[in-house]
Image (tube, grey):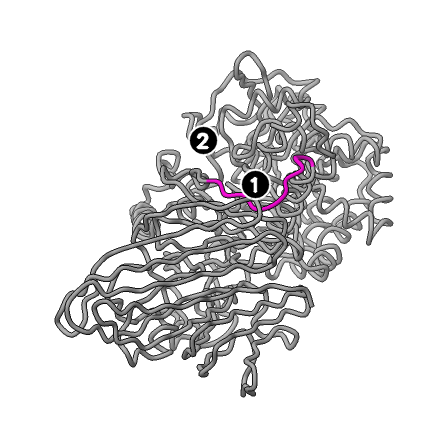
Amino acid sequence: MLYSGTKNIHTHYMKKINLIFGTHNHQPIGNFDFIFEDAHDRAYKPFLDVFEKFPDLKIAKHYTGILYDWLFLHRPELMQRLSTLVKQGRIELISGGFYEPILAVIPDEDKTGQIEKLTKFIKKKFGYEATGLWLAERIWEQHLTKPLAQAGIEYVILDDTHFKYAGLSDEALLGYYITEEQGRTVNLFPISKQLRYTIPFQDVEKTIDYLRSIATEAGDRIAVFADDGEKFGVWPDTFEHVYKNRWLERFFQALTDNQDWIRTMTFKEALHEIEPIGRIYLPNASYAEMMHWSLPTVKGFNDYDVFEHQLKDLNLFAKNDPFVRGGFWRNFMVKYPESNNMHKKMLEQSMRAQSLISKKKKVSAKTLDKIWAAQCNCPYWHGVFGGTYLANLRHPIYTNLIEAETELDKVEKLDGVTVDVLDFDRDGKKEIMMKSATLGLYINPFEGGKIFELDYKPAKKNILDIVSRREEGYHQKLRDMKNQPQDAHAGGSIHDRATAKETGLEDFLNYDRYRRGSLIEHFVPIGTTLDEMYRARQTELGDFITGPFAYQTGGTKAKQTVTLTRTTSVHADGQDFNIELTKAITLEKGKSAFTARYTVKNLSEGTLDVRFAIENCYGLLAGNAPDRYYYFDGQTLDDKRLQSLGEVRSKMAGLKDEWLRIHARLESSEDALVMRYPIETISLSEAGFERVYQGSTVLMCYDLSLELGKPFLLTLTQKFSRI
């Protein structure tokens, strides 16, 4: 016998408890195959290997559609074993959004569509009617009740934290509740925080003792454990603990040895055999760590951290934690404009598809599926697990959305160049969208007149898919780690680990003053260095990088131009010069290129000596790969990698990504000092602090002596082609 605990002695009034044990398995769109393989080898397969040895136990399993697709293609033998266990009644399968979206922030039609897709998939592959839902990141908003019920969902699994926020105590959470919205009802199961923290990290006896403490003679209580399947083998140090040291086997043996008073059951069985405790309405919530991460400012993040630790130091936290909570998940779209950009582009295409459907236009299931795939939650937020900073997770979001947009263009039979002016990002100010069959330029006239999204449609790539360098609340931990041994910071909880993947990361904590993009104009002193620009420590003599531009649009279906103008002061040599800057961005039908024609005028007496630098950015996924590199006509670079720093005199700058098959070539009508440097962020993941390449910046620099009445004229041409 593996379990060393003591089996209860039978009595007439033996206390009993029902245990529902479930795991949620997920990998995001865009994750590398080797990560899928590692998770299969270290968690998904060995878990079933152990479970199959205990025929008297029942558990629940949730796999996302993304993971199902990969497993059926690459590991069909595991899916066959899963199917056998389902048919034996030993495993209950749980549905959800097929692509693991945050259901609260996608359109209702997509909510029901995604859920029905996974439910039908489970029925087709396993012959099983799944009526439960795993809610991505347990992000609950009360309005979800109605669309979930409409999608055939009978129950949802949530953290007990949500129920405590509603005022319920631990003793009131040993069962399930019913909730309603506009008369539609769904049952809600609370996940035990106690079990989430003991399983699998503490001795098996801890869990058995806890279950014994809540067992009753009536035997109608339910304890629910439901958590990430990856914590059973993929999380740091868990493979050795769970499998090599046989924790899971000892746990299942303990449940088997004590099955006379611990009954493992499914959620479906609970609904059919046990009445709900009552009705409840829950506030907007997620798990506690997620709500901390979502606080939109560094000050808020750090203040919350300090407050929580103060309560713990005073032994006040445990009894008051229902009244201590962080932020609201949706504010990730405030904290990270790049997340908001993806979300609003997703809404743009989703609403467009539904509008066409309402007009009886044929929108294919494949197109809708592309939109749904772009709703995968992982790149929309950032915490220990979140992927906003990871380019490989953001990339497929845009790939799917650009593909969907191209298909919807065909449905609408769009041709030529279009210009739309509307509030794309929903901030109360309008943006300008210039689009053709090959390019999509999203321009923000109220923030530097910059291009903030640049879709090169033949490659299905947003060239400006870049996350800017910004301070995170946890960056102070990295500074504190300097000159201290790494193992001094490795905490027991995955949320507290503080290690670094490489030394010297604190030197890369450079913070941008603005969101990165293209056609961003800097007026800086002549002699400003590459290092100053790279570290965002340059002296800006004007406010063109963030100031509002007046704009005009005009043209034909064959060619459209957006003209942006700003007049403001540039302070140099103790004098304020009134400067007018005009840039006319032109996009033509049939060309994978656009031009920006600049006119810079000094409207004041005197001569302004200044460096005029135009910033363009390129997010090409990898900075240190041999098949992604810079080139300059007639020149040989010592280091041509996209993560390199350097400067040359040239009238052009070229970047090639042979993996994405993208060739970007920027041409200038005037000779320039061309500076180049990488945009690299420092973020925290389950493996520790890491440096992430976001993209490359090319600065076309011109040293000017601007006199009254003598404008500087310049044309930049940005070309794209397939390699």
| x 61%, y 38%: residue | 225
Is residue 413 covered in magenta?
yes
Residue under pointer 2: 284
Report the residue at 36% width, 64% height from top: 511
* First along the sequence among labels 1 and 2: 2
321 horizontally vs 44: left or right: left
Identify the residue shown where x is 67% and y is 30%: 113
Residue closest to the eye, 25 or 201:
25
Q: Name the mark on residue 506.
A: none
- Per the rendered image, the range of residues in magenta is 411-420
Give the residue displayed 64% in from the left and 21% down from the top. 13
- Per the image, label 1 sits on a secondary structure element best described as helix
Task: State how far apart marks 1 and 2 are (Cα).
Answer: 23 Å
Mark 1: amino acid: Met
Could you say whether the residue bearing mark 2 is in a helix, strand or loop? loop
The x, y position of residue 87, in whole percent, is 86, 33
Residue 415 shown in magenta:
yes
Closer to the observer: label 1 or label 2?
Answer: 1
Q: Name above or below for residue 249 compared with residue 533.
A: above
- Residue 335 % position (x, y): 40, 48
Q: Residue furthest top?
A: 183
**Quadrant of the rendered structure where residue 135 is?**
top right
Which numbered disc covers residue 346?
1
On the image, the x and y values in percent for residue 708 come to: 21, 68
Callout 2: few (<14), some (14-19), or many (20+) C-alpha neighbours within 10 Å?
some
- Dot 1, how many residues are within 10 Å of its Cα: few (below 14), some (14-19), or many (20+)? many
Task: Tell me if residue 17 can be seen.
Answer: no
